[in-house]
Image (tube, rainbow, N blue to C red):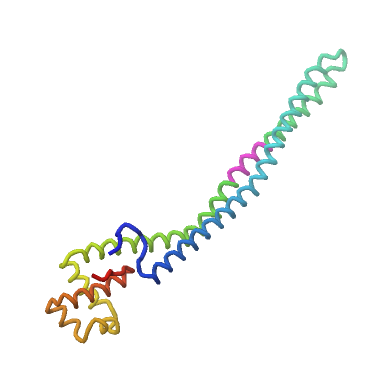
Amino acid sequence: MTTRFLPYATTPGRLAAQLFSDVAVFVWTGAWLIVGMAVNDAVSAIADAGRKVENGANGIASNLASAGDGAEHIPVVGDAVGKPLVLASEAAMDVARAGHSLDMTGSWLAGLLGVSVIAVPLLIVVVPWLVLRVRFFRRKWIVTGMAANPAGEQLLALRALTNRPPAKLATVGADPVGGWRREDPATIRALASLELRAAGITVRAD
């Protein structure tokens, strides 16, 4: 038998199907990762715009506040000149707060949409693929362990009599059931080989 530790079949047809599915899942995952990152980058542009607005408005607010403080020291007209500048500074601060809110919302939304775009397609394809691969590996591990001893080989032969179609059983001999009952080594080996091949495992000739 081939090694039990590889999660791949050794029969050519099933091995080819498994390799094809691996490549398909890899390509599918890579494509959706690219799409998810593109969505994240696109929505992140909103956050970048909000960040720029916040930084610019903070700078304007600081300059207006400084100008307002300086204008208040002008004799006679100081209050009249300084007050509008202070109000304008406060308005700029409101704009900065709005920019900050846009930055936070855009960043959160970019992460959420990016993960959502990636997660849903992966759950649809990758999870079933992983379940099937784990199920195959578990079955391979069990049947190869059974085939390693005479009692297990007899049990595999019995499973073949129960599970394999009549056309497959006919290839073993004219009376596979009788051979199994008589504990004929050749019949048991042939029946066990049928069950192993059904699990995707080839048997080396002795």
Residue sitting farthest toward the bottom: 174
Q: Residue 177 location, x and y as percent?
A: 18, 81
What's the magenta region?
A: 99-109
Residue sitting farthest toward the left: 182
130 left or right of 86? left
Viewer-proximal residue, 80 or 113? 113
Viewer-proximal residue, 142 or 191? 191
Q: Quadrant of residue 156?
A: bottom left
Our reading of the magenta stretch's main secondary structure is helix
Q: Residue 50 location, x and y as percent?
A: 68, 39
Q: Residue 148 location, x and y as percent?
A: 21, 64
Quarter containing the C terminus: bottom left
* Residue in the picture at 53% in, 59% down: 27
Is 142 a magenta residue? no
Up/down of 33 relative to 57, above or below: below
Q: Residue 28 location, x and y as percent?
A: 52, 60
Is 102 a magenta residue? yes
140 left or right of 13? left
Q: Quadrant of residue 90?
A: top right
* Residue in the picture at 60% in, 47% down: 110
39 left or right of 184? right
175 left or right of 131? left
Quarter containing the N terminus: bottom left
Up/down of 79 relative to 87, above or below: above
